[in-house]
Amino acid sequence: MSLLAKAPEGRISALLDTAQARPGFTWLRAPEIGSTMVRGRAGATGAPFNLGEVTVTRCALTLPSGEVGHAYIQGRRKSDAEAAALVDALMQTDAADALRASVLDPLMQELTAAKAARAAKAAATKVEFFTLARGED
Amino acid sequence: MYVAVKGGERAIESAHAWLAEERRGDTSVAELSIAQIREQLSLAVNRVMAEGSLYDPDLAALAIKQARGDLIEAIFLIRAYRTTLPRFGASNPVDTGAMACDRRISATFKDLPGGQVLGPTFDYTHRLLDFTLAANGEVPEAPTRSAAPADVPHVTEFLNQEGLIEEAPLDDTTPPDLTREPLEMPAERALRLQALTRADEGFTLGMAYSTQRGYGRNHAFVGELRIGAVPVEMEIPELGFAVEIGEVTLTECETVNQFKGSKTEPPQFTRGYGLVFGQTERKAISMALVDRALRWEELGEDNEGAPAQDAEFVLYHADNIQATGFLEHIKLPHYVDFQSELELVRKLRREAGADQMQEAAE
């Protein structure tokens, strides 16, 4: 679910639809947009305080075979939430291995690559201090 | 006397239609898209998210477009939208120690684990207008270097090891929320931090600057400033465990301040803390300075009567939506109020005039 929540817009649907046809399902909770209050800690490690909210879309559905899928994803993205909940439900079925290979692994690779690209740019701005020798000895 | 208050509808409609036209500007110039604002005016977007107190770059970009670039108006739109959202819950406190840092600098330690990472900063630019931007030039790709994933510990941890700085002991009290309960004095630190993180950048900057100039001086060093993405994790009631629901970019500033010691505490450094949505460095540093100034009482310092030490003054005037709401309302019709003032002044003048005439007669 954590991985699905961080997928770029439309990406889960794209991967899921290439992997397999979508099964039918029933909504337990139709996609709904709301917010979550993000908290921080004073001095990074102390008492919590409310930092501000983030928009979140959530939904829950059930497959004809009974598996329940949930999604809580950042942003206002109903179709992404639907796709995420479907993947969550399907991961509890026999399709799990196939879906891991065709949806979750590629998502993980893409997110890791994006993070690494950013980290590499940050690393290029790392300061290397050098001290000039002074003439006393 | 009663004064007519109806009859503005047609004028208001025309004004709004003209506003829409002026917002669009010259139609021979291409229209701005939300994505362009989000990607190319990202620091404005960050400010609107921070002070609007809602992290959603697309909404903030839309608000900026709708407000014609008036950021306080855009923040107003975001705050209004925010109130319409059902609250699903609160996140676990974010772990800024696990931040994927775009930038991380310390003004107190030159060589520190994780290093000084400048990130995409305006620092060290010459502040000369760059006319190549006006010429639609392609940007050369930023250089990269292989980055070994490494821990980037907080600077305060090193000082902690020697006991040279006050600790921020872990605590899990549910913090008060000023979006649910009105802000009341005395305000505990958690409430002050919430108010400061959404406070107006200009006001916070002015207050912080006043402490540097001597009004409640607390001699701050930027122990550490870091900007980057942190995961947001939330307990999902249906599942009974926490999952990551997304990721937010934050700016965190920890200041290291002088402290002479008190009756119960030996001399050690104290801390101010700033944490703000987005890449919002000026605001985060300002927040940390003002947070530190407001802590005078719990640290047993003297009240110098400085504005930045006065929690009531700072917190009740820091919110730009409250401030602009009250300020701008005085331009709206006050015909009846004013009519009564007018009557009063006329009456006083009549009485004074009558007295003068009487004196003259005597």
Image (cartoon, coloured by chain):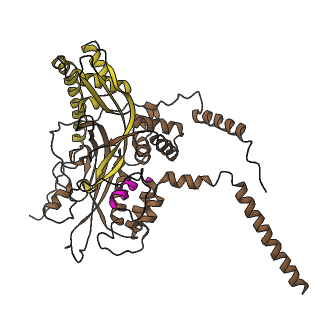
Residues shaded magenta = B184-200
Camera sees residue B209? yes
Q: Closest to the observer: B269 or B116?
A: B269
Position of B161 compared to A56: left or right?
left
Where is residue B328 shown, x and y percent of the image? 59, 52
Q: Is residue B195 magenta?
A: yes
Residue occupying the point 26% across, 28% down: A4
Q: Position of residue B37 (x, y in %)?
A: 45, 35
Does the rendering let one see residue A6? no
Q: Colour of chain A?
A: yellow
* Looking at the image, residue B210 lies above or below residue B139: below
Chain identifier matching the brown colour in the rendered picture? B
The answer to which quarter of the image holds residue B11 is top right
Which residue is drawn at the image coordinates 19% and 24% (left, top)?
A105
Most foreground residue, B51 or B148 = B51
Residue at horizontal 39%, vertical 62%? B208
To which quarter of the image does residue B235 belong? top left
